[in-house]
Structure formats: structure tokens, C-alpha cells
């Protein structure tokens, strides 16, 4: 059974991915990674809650969310 994660979880993952890319380009040390760490915490909390409510494996939901976020990021823009 394929898991189709909600758009909100995909959005949170994409925000975390963007925060990581931004943090990697900054030179302000550990403090520059805080936005990414906060975004990752938000993703994990949302994935855990969704998996629990849906009776699904948290690990499988997380994999589906990351895959969907990656797939959406690689998709060509709609014209």
C-alpha cells in the first residue's frame, strides 16, 4: 500500500529542505543551522502525529513525505 502524504507534510519537508540549503551557504556557525533544526523538528512532530492518527508506520510516512517532497521539487514548473 503506497502512502500518499498530505500536502501539509510535503510543504513542511520542502521548507526544511530549503532551510538546510540556506544554512549550508551561511557562515555564521552553529546558530545558522537553527532554522533548519527547527524546521526538521516541525516535520518530525507532524509526521509522528499523522502516522499515529492514521495507524501507519512513522518511518514509512517519513519516507513517503521525503520522496514526495523530492519529486515535487524536481518537477518542471507548470505553465
Image (cartoon, rainbow, N blue to C red):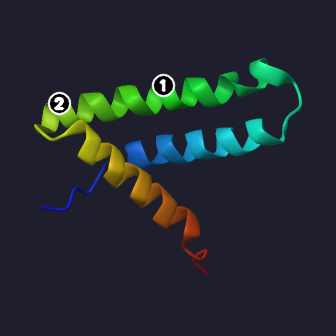
Tell me the residue that label 2 is attached to. 52
Identify the mark at residue 41; answer none if there is no mark: 1
| Residue sitting at x 14%, y 39% | 54
Give the quarter of the figure containing the N terminus.
bottom left
| Residue sitting at x 50%, y 60% | 70
Identify the mark at residue 13; answer none if there is no mark: none
- Residue extending farthest to the right is 27
Measure how far apart labels 1 and 2 are at the Cα level.
Answer: 17 Å
Q: Earlier in the sequence, mark 1 or mark 2?
A: 1
| Residue sitting at x 32%, y 49% | 6
Count residues near mark 2 (Cα–Cα under 10 Å), then give few for <14, some for 14-19, many for 20+: few
Give the quarter of the figure containing the C terminus.
bottom right
Q: Position of residue 14 (x, y in %)?
A: 54, 48
Q: Is residue 65 above or below residue 77?
A: above
Tell whether label 2 touches label 1 (CB within 8 Å): no
| Residue sitting at x 56%, y 63% | 73
Q: Nearer the viewer, residue 73 or 63?
A: 63
Count residues near mark 1 (Cα–Cα under 10 Å), then give few for <14, some for 14-19, many for 20+: few
Q: Is residue 39 left or right of residue 7?
A: right
Q: Is residue 10 above or below residue 4?
A: above
Q: Position of residue 66 (x, y in %)?
A: 43, 51
Q: SS at mark 2?
A: helix
Looking at the rendering, which quadrant does residue 67 occupy?
bottom left
Amino acid at each position: 500500500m503506497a502512502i500518499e502524504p498530505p500536502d501539509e507534510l510535503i510543504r513542511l519537508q520542502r521548507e526544511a529542505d530549503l532551510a538546510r540549503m540556506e544554512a549550508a551557504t551561511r557562515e555564521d556557525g552553529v546558530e545558522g543551522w537553527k532554522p533548519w533544526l527547527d524546521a526538521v523538528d516541525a516535520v518530525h512532530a507532524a509526521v509522528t502525529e499523522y502516522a499515529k492518527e492514521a495507524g501507519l508506520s512513522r518511518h514509512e510516512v517519513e519516507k513517503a513525505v521525503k520522496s514526495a517532497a523530492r519529486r515535487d521539487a524536481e518537477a518542471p514548473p507548470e505553465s
